[in-house]
Every structure is written in C-alpha cells, then in structure tokens.
Amino acid sequence: MPARAFVDCHSHVVPSGDDGARNVGEGVALCRDAVASGTRLLYATPHVWPDLRMHEARERRFREAAAELAALVEGLELRIGFELTPDRSLLDDDPRRYRLEGTAVCLVETPFSGGLATFFAVAEHVESAGLTPLIAHPERSLSLVGTPGHRDALLERDWPLQITASSLTGRSGADSEALAWRLLGDYDRVVVASDGHGHHRPARLDAAWAAVSERLGSEIAARAFGGAILGVAPATADAARPAASS
Ligand SMILES: [Fe+2]
C-alpha cells in the first residue's frame, strides 16, 4: 500500500436517520476531511438497529444521499455497506443485502455489554449465506474487554476483526486501548476503521496509522489500513497521493 491511501470500511458519513451525519452537507465535510487525512476508499455503513431497521424507504433515501454526496467530494470512492447490531430479527433477513459493496463481508458489531448468544447467532447466519462476518470494534465491548472467556470464544472463530482508530489513541479508555493494540499485534486479520460519526469522531485514520506504523511497523500498518484483508483497494493511481492539506 502506498503511504496514506487508506481504506476505511466503517463510517456513518451518509445521513440515514441514525446518529451519524445529519444531512448531506455534514457528510460532505466529513468526507473531505477523510480525503485530507489520506482516505481514498470509504464505506458508508449506516446502523441497522433493532429499532431502526433498514426498511425499503430508509434504504432508498440513504442510497440517494450517498449518490448526492459522492458527486460532491473529489478524490474519494464512496461505497455502500451496513453495520448490523445483533438482533434475532436479522435471522429472518438475507445477509447478502448488507454486504460491504464489492466484498463478501458483512460488518457485525459486538454488543457493548451482556451476553454474546445473539451476536454469535447473527454472525453464523452471515456465514451460512456464504459471507464472512467482519467483527466491529471488539475492543469497545465490555463483554469482551472484561471477560477473557468471551474473548477466547470469539477469537477461536477466526473471523476478521475491525478495530476503531480512536481506540488505538485512547479515546475509549485504557482497557480498550490495550486490547486494541494486543489484537492488532497478535492477529493477522485485523483492519482499522474510523467509525466516523461527526465532528466529535471524524472519519480520519491518519493519527492511528502513524501510531501503528511507529509501534508495529509499516507491514502491519499497510495490512490494517490498506484494504487487502477485505479484498479491496483504492481504484486509481491518484489514490496514492495524499491531499495537499494533510
Ligand atoms: Fe459504527
């Protein structure tokens, strides 16, 4: 991966009625900031919550907003995906509709607290459709941080993991920071994503990339920020060029 041509597989930069960008203008600002920080391929992954499902009208509005936003931001390929919050109702859905565009991967978040039974059921449902669950921010799950047995049960599945960039720089607390670094250093299939929601948590990967490059070396940094684990890469040679303002 050329330095600073990041693939960010998890963000909420496209308005969808959840807690991400509130309108296209805010999304454009988040995307331009992402480009300035070195991101070249960015997935917009609205929440699919138990109480905010991806019904037809919501998905149509989301896709229209994504197309409008993509046309307003230069130097960025914006792709569509979704972030599944484990819920039994998802077991009645076809997981293929929730793939990260251009991959055979579904982003499934870990519960922030409580047991993991529903989480495992949903992740296995994804697998049964021939897809791979990408496990979102395990380092931020109290169920995993505080319970080594839960952690072992997850890690033995060998699913790829997605660490949130700001966890590596301490935003989620010392325990999450320590687990994020441990997972990134110990496992091959770990990607770093912004989970950018707004100005309070922007869609930037540059600070985490610099920290990982310094602490774990350029090979792990390239693997974690470059998209190879997902089988994707920025589309053009221009992607290798960092933006002037970065
Ligand atoms: Fe998210």
Image (cartoon, rainbow, N blue to C red):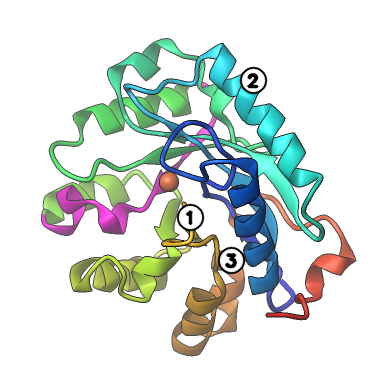
Using the numbered discs, state the Cα–Cα distance from disc 2 to disc 3 in whole angstroms.
30 Å
Q: Earlier in the sequence, mark 2 or mark 3?
A: 2
* Mark 3, other Cα within 10 Å: few <14 / some 14–19 / many ≥20: many
In the rendering, which numbered label is found on residue 215?
Answer: none
Q: Is residue 130 magenta?
A: yes
Q: Which residues are magenta?
A: 129-146
- Between residues 59 and 177, which one lies in front from this camera angle? 59
Relative placement, left or right, of 139 versus 166 is left
Label 1 residue near ligand 1, CB within 8 Å: no
Which residue: 11% across, 57% down?
146
Q: Which residue is mark 1?
A: 198
- Label 1: element kind: loop
Q: Which residue is mark 3?
A: 225
* Mark 1, other Cα within 10 Å: few <14 / some 14–19 / many ≥20: some
Q: Are marks 1 and 2 in contact (CB under 8 Å)?
A: no
Question: The N terminus appears in which quarter of the rendering?
Answer: bottom right
- Between residues 148 and 140, which one lies in front from this camera angle? 140
Relative placement, left or right, of 84 versus 73 is left
Using the numbered discs, state the Cα–Cα distance from disc 1 to disc 3 in whole angstroms.
20 Å
- Please tell me whether residue 217 is drawn above or below residue 84 in the rendered image: below
Q: Which residue is mark 2?
A: 60
Which residue: 42% across, 53% down?
161
Judged by depth in the image, the label closer to the viewer, 1 or 2, is 1
Judged by depth in the image, the label closer to the viewer, 2 or 3, is 2
Residue farthest toward the bottom in the current orientation of the protein: 214
Residue 121, given in percent of the width and then of the height, sits at 30, 25
